[in-house]
Image: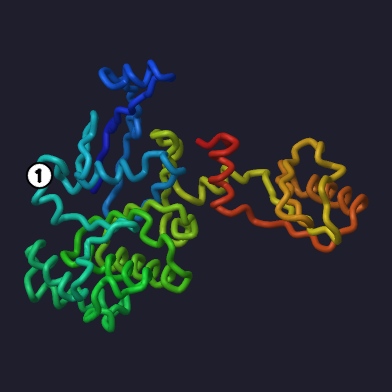
Amino acid sequence: MNVIEVQNLRKEFKSHSSRSGLSGAFRDLFTRNYKVLAAVDNISLTVKQGEMVGYIGENGAGKSTTIKMLTGILTPTSGSVIVNGMDPHKEREQFVRSIGVVFGQRSQLWWDIAVQESFKLLKKVYRVSDEDYENHMGHVIDTLEIGPLLDKPVRKLSLGQRMRCELAAALIHNPPLLFLDEPTIGLDVLVKLKIRKFLKEINETYKTTILLTTHDLTDIEALCERVVLLDEGKIIYDGKLNQLQTQAVEGRKQVEFEFLKEVHDIDLRGTANVHWEQKDATTWLAYVNGDERFVSELISDVVQKNPIKNVRINEISTEEIVRKIYEEGMAIT
């Protein structure tokens, strides 16, 4: 069963284009030039019930715009959106009771009242019975460890505490679909681990479908088997995370050379099939296209010409893979 069905979804925005010079500024007072920009450019996407999908891309790629259309905040310029069997824009009241949303930089809790009072208000908004609230939220509150926070005003919570309460608030009505837009932004490692553990648990327990957008790719690695990469409003990859990693690093290795003294250049920078990057004054990274024999020969050549403190062959991280895709246009299928 598909929880999300998107066909040829497009969102355009008008951008004002200023004319140059004083005369141009004067003309702009009476008539303005506009150009149309496609933030989301004819994407098609389906998400099945119970999936946890990472939706990633650079700033301005169209991630948040997509989420806002899927949640009914923005109306698409063209294309069709069906979420939980409904059109988010035409069946608004019924639709919002079937989703949960957490925006990392926006709050759905009332700033000056206690957290539990916000929960009670949301309980009425979503028309949750006392019995359902007690059964479900008791588990959520215990798992997220927010019991001691319930009597505190939201304004007195730390960022990590508030985000855990935001996540709980999004789940008061136990929605089958959860949208998370940068839910761990600015949080410390321990809070991130708690949130990841909780998301895995609700996915396993309630088969909650989760669409996650984030710049922290360790969240994606920890939670999502499937990723969707967006670039300039278009989907450039939709598939398993491990397949992306395999395709992107096939035949590619990262060799880290730590030298005994500061090195500004390396004799072998022109070596074929090797891309060099300087990490710091004494450390260089070599991205190698080749087999183990080629890597061994490269290490041998570098060691012979430079005093070496340490050499490491590293796994290429998902973050590094995605960076290479966007910076170098690495081909993926």
* Residue at the (43%, 19%) spot, across then down: 21
Instruction: From the viewer's perspective, tell me whether residue 37 is left or right of residue 169.
Output: right
Can you give x and y, in whole percent of width and height, for residue 162 in the image? Answer: 31, 69
Which residue sits at x=70%, y=51%? 254
Which of the 4 quarters of the picture holds residue 109? Answer: bottom left
Q: Residue at x 35, y 34 (%)?
A: 39
Residue 35 in the figure: left or right of residue 276: left
Q: In this view, does 182 lie above or below 330?
A: below
Nearer to us in this view, 269 or 185: 185
Is residue 247 shown above or below 102? above
Place of residue 283 in the rendered image (x, y in percent of width and height, measured from the top left): 76, 56
Disc 1 secondary structure class? loop
As rendered, which of 111 and 307 lies closer to the eye? 111
Identify the residue shown where x is 22% and y is 40%: 74
Describe residue 246's horizontal placement relative to residue 152 as left or right.
Answer: right
The three-letter code of the residue at mark 1 reads: Glu
**Residue 12: x and y, percent?**
29, 30
| Display colour scheme | rainbow
